[in-house]
């Protein structure tokens, strides 16, 4: 019996959002709306979504000892996520600076902050939490070596789910563990290229791309 249906190993950011009539060109200043601050980050968002759907969910992440970190901890608690794995300190909380135009298109700059300090050592220290989780989910807004260490500490029957965003080439050890691997077209191209394949090299049919990814 597992203590958790899902453990998310991933990022937690504060999203700082400003609406603009148009995004500025290089060297240009434009006026925007009032600043809105939201809890975010791919990892924290996954944990909140799963908990709201009724899953027993925990989060392994790192935030800063600052107001943004407290915002994230409060939002996880309000959604019913167990924050037992959330580490505090080491760097400021990660921040995403987002401008949104009237059509909904956005431009985002991310400062990883504490997300970049979630280390393989942190994962090893939380090995009991990983072994108590039926499914472990990760993304790539934390160091790649930290995600690999999570795979190495899975319980024998646990499933590992990876959304490789932002995309980068993935080591064989990580690809073998994914069940499932969740990709969009751009992410699939990056992974296939990193393995010596390419989208064009396996044809235009996305089913061919899927077969090439499964072969990896």
Image (tube, rainbow, N blue to C red):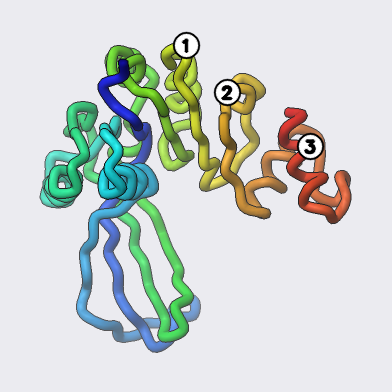
- Name the residue beneath numbered marker 3: 212
Q: Are marks 3 and 1 in contact (CB under 8 Å)?
A: no
**Image quarter for residue 204?**
bottom right
**Image quarter for residue 33?**
bottom left
Mark yes or no: residue 94 visible: no
Question: What residue do we see at 48% from left, 39% from top?
Answer: 140
Count of marks, rendered view: 3
Give the CA separation, mark 1 to mark 2.
11 Å
Of the pair 128 and 68, the residue shown nearer to us:
128
Q: Nearer the viewer, mark 3 or mark 1?
A: 1
Q: Position of residue 50 (x, y in %)?
A: 33, 44
| Earlier sequence position, callout 3 versus callout 1 | 1
Residue 36's place in the image compared with 149, above or below, is below
Q: Position of residue 18 (x, y in %)?
A: 30, 75
Q: Which mark is residue 156?
A: 1
- Name the residue beneath numbered marker 2: 177
Residue that sits furthest to the bottom in the current view: 21
| Earlier sequence position, callout 3 versus callout 2 | 2
Question: What residue do we see at 31% from left, 19% from top?
Answer: 2
| Earlier sequence position, callout 1 versus callout 2 | 1
């Amino acid at each position: 019996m597992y203590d958790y249906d899902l453990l998310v190993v991933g990022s937690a950011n504060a999203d700082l959002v400003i609406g603009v009539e148009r995004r500025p060109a290089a060297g240009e200043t434009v006026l925007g709306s009032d600043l809105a601050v939201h809890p975010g980050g791919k990892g924290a968002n996954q944990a909140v979504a799963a908990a709201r759907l009724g899953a027993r969910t925990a989060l392994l992440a790192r935030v800063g000892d600052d107001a943004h970190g407290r915002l994230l901890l409060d939002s996880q608690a309000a959604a019913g996520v167990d924050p037992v794995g959330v580490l505090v300190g080491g760097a400021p909380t990660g921040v995403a600076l987002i401008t949104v135009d009237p059509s909904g298109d956005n431009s985002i700059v991310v400062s990883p902050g504490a997300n970049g300090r979630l280390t393989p050592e942190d994962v090893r220290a939380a090995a009991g939490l990983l072994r108590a989780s039926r499914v472990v989910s990760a993304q790539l807004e934390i160091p790649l070596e930290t995600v690999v260490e999570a795979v190495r500490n899975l319980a024998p029957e646990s499933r590992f789910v990876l959304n490789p965003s932002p995309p980068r080439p993935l080591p064989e050890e990580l690809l073998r563990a994914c069940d499932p691997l969740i990709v969009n077209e751009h992410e699939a191209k990056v992974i296939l290229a990193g393995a010596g394949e390419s989208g064009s090299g396996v044809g235009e049919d996305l089913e061919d791309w899927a077969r090439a990814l499964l072969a990896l």
